[in-house]
Amino acid sequence: MTLRLWSYFFRQTLSNMINNRTVHAIGLGTMVASLLILGTFLVLFVNLNAWIEGWEHSLSMSVYLEDGITDPQSDRVISFINGLPAAEIERFISKDDALRDLRSALGSQAGLLEGLSENPLPASFEVVFDAIDGEIDIQEIKKEIEDLEGVEEVQYTEDWLERFEGLMSMVRLVGFVVGGLFCIGILFIVTNTIKLTIYSRRDEIEILKLVGATDWFVKIPFLLEGMVQGILSGILALLALFSGFILLSTKNMYFLSLAVLDIIFLPPKYAISILLTSVVLGFVGSLIAVGRFFDV
């Protein structure tokens, strides 16, 4: 009996959605767009977090040289760096190399550099530390290198990490605010979609109640409508998000014109969270709609 009853509920749900397909299609599209924006924020957060974690486990330093540095000055800088514990000069980037890297990173926008009368970028050494001893004072090392003749500036990964920590806090805050607003918007969409389907079947509902149908017997198909709309919205949003990820993953993303950033998709727990959130919002929205109708 229970199986036959649920079979009736699902048939009624499918019939309701087909009969009101235009309303459901509009609601579905709006929900997918909202979840897609929310998912994009999650992808951004996950990738920023992964990049920062990767940088935290390695230390690199960029030693920018002054224009016109002499060979003896350059040799002293190289000698000092080679004398540092676990330090190794990974690459020397000339001014021409730096400009070439920048052109490559800019891609189609490289034409912006055509108007330059001279190359403004400095030459530099890229230094990596294979192992970081806890006794090493990286700030002191930075200061000593900057004091060398011919060195203009020194930057290292922790400088960028400190800046990105502030960015991550901002991303979290924006994510919570935007996510909350979109969740409220999705509830509003589902509630009004189910309301319209209820009003389109008002006469049928009255007849069912007159012949003895309980409120829950009438409500369940509408609750299932909200859940089905939530499931479809979540799946379509994840598919659209994954398609965007595939397009981006085929392109090289650069940081500071040098480092190629690997883009990762949402971990399974985040993807499942988006789907569950969509289903819950669909159910809650339909519950609000039927609750208001039957309270009237």
Image (tube, rainbow, N blue to C red):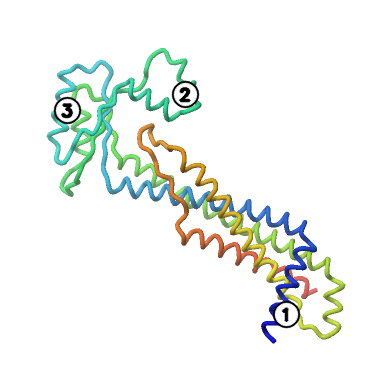
x%, y% of residue 44? 48, 48
Tell me the residue at 84%/71% (across/down). 202
Tell me the residue at 68%/71% (across/down). 224
Q: In which quarter of the image is residue 194?
A: bottom right
SS of the residue under disc 3: helix
x%, y% of residue 236? 61, 55
- Pointer 2 residue: 110
x%, y% of residue 238? 56, 55
- Amino acid carrying label 1: it is Trp
Q: In this view, does 5 lie above or below 94?
A: below
Q: In this view, does 68 lie above or below 35?
A: above
Quadrant containing the N terminus in the rendered view: bottom right
For residue 158, side relative to residue 276 (left or right) = left
- Amino acid carrying label 3: it is Ile
x%, y% of residue 289? 73, 68
Viewer-side residue, 179 vs 1: 1
- Pointer 3 residue: 78
Q: Quadrant of residue 7?
A: bottom right
